[in-house]
Image (cartoon, rainbow, N blue to C red):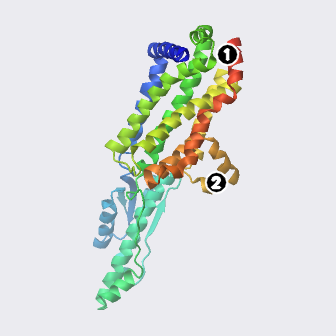
Amino acid sequence: MEIFKRVIDVMKREFCRLATKRIYWFILVFAPVFCFVFFADLLKEGLPMHLPVAVVDEDNTALSRQLYRSLDAIPQTEVVLRTADFTEARKAMQQGKIYGIFHIPVDFRREVSAGKEPMISFYTNDTYLLPASLAYKDMRLQAVLANGAVQQALMLAKGKGGPQLQARLMPVTVDINPLNNPWISYAIYLASVLMPAFVFMFAMFTAVYSIVQEIKDNTTEEWLKESNNSVAVALAGKLLPQTLIFLVVGLLYLSVLYGYMHFPLNSGFFPMFLSMFLLVLAAQGFALFVFGIIPCGRIALSVCALWGVLSFSVSGFTYPATSMPWLVQWVCHLFPLRHYYLLYVDQALNGVAMIYSWQSYLALGMFAVLPLLILPKLNRDLKKNRYLP
């Protein structure tokens, strides 16, 4: 009971410190809310829409105008420039105003009528990889549809229809079934990991900064005295209020993502809640571990920032970890966000039983207890005030 009372006393003291310093309001409330609103608005369409492209129409016939209108009707592309001068379109691409050029050659309609094979060309600016790839996909789709329309017109003119026409236009029928994300929405797999990633980073920063601030304010002795000189009690009382706040923020994220926005959640809410809870604990445990082995607050914060930023690259949700070099595939397991991503895929998307994800749950738990390895050192250094802010 005495230990419990000491923890409560330290928690009350920490709540007062969190409430009276503006930097904590920013990192605990305003920054997470801003990140959530920003990315929720950025990804609200699921996919980038209305990507600007140009149509170079050197034929200017009813058929070429039909191709132009069909391309403009695709939601992901928007024809912002229609010209007969290829140089004008090329300059627009070089200036970054468009992502692609759809080129309809001269005499396109006449060659189609004569049964020849006119060539439709399209160009993309792959400096901007994602929008250029999407624009390429839409222009290629339009070219395939145009080819199908031409073949249909020619075969009907020759009196060939019915099964012969269908076999010529589509000899193989492809049945595409995108699992777990049938809308091919970037928001579903990006927002569901980006939001917790920011909680993870802010939790690391707050854990280190709050201890560094005790040293800068020369209140370490008062803090330890409140815990009866027990570093374990002092750390528990300091981090528990932060844990509760970040858990509330994480619950807000999860509720909006899976409740309001109706993202796939095939295993129910509890597995993802447990994942978020363990991610917050893992962030604090990793931050304490870094702070325990690095005697400078600035460097410890920098290491946490670096670890958080690298998590976006090596966790596997933007580039598959299995395609990375073998060394990176091993190193990526040293990042807590990697295990949260695996839990998200298993629980939210695939809906497997929790028991099959025990390794990822265990990994996050191991990050949470990392400070136990350096607790004696933390005990000595904090009591002797060896750390440099």
Identify the element where label 1 is drawn. Answer: helix
Residue 342 image offset from top left, x and y in percent: 53, 49
Q: Residue at x 37, y 85 (%)?
A: 167
Check the image and report above or below for 323 versus 336: below
Query: Going from the N terminus, do you reach mark 2 or mark 1 first?
Result: 2
User: In the image as oriented, which residue stretches furthest toward the front?
Assistant: 1
Q: In the rendered view, would you say 53 is above or below 171? A: above
According to the picture, the residue beneath numbered tag 1 turns out to be 382
Q: Residues within 10 Å of mark 2 (few under 14, many from 20)?
A: some
Residue at 55% in and 43% down: 361
**Image mark count:** 2
Left or right? Give the position of 300 relative to 122: right
Given this view, does label 2 or label 1 mark the residue nearer the observer?
A: 1
Return the x and y of residue 68 as percentages of the image width and height: 33, 64
Residue 15 location, x and y as percent?
46, 16
| Callout 1 amino acid | Leu
The label number, if any, that marks residue 324 in the structure image: 2
Please tell me which residue lies in front, 21 or 280. Answer: 280
Q: Residue at x 40, y 77 (%)?
A: 173
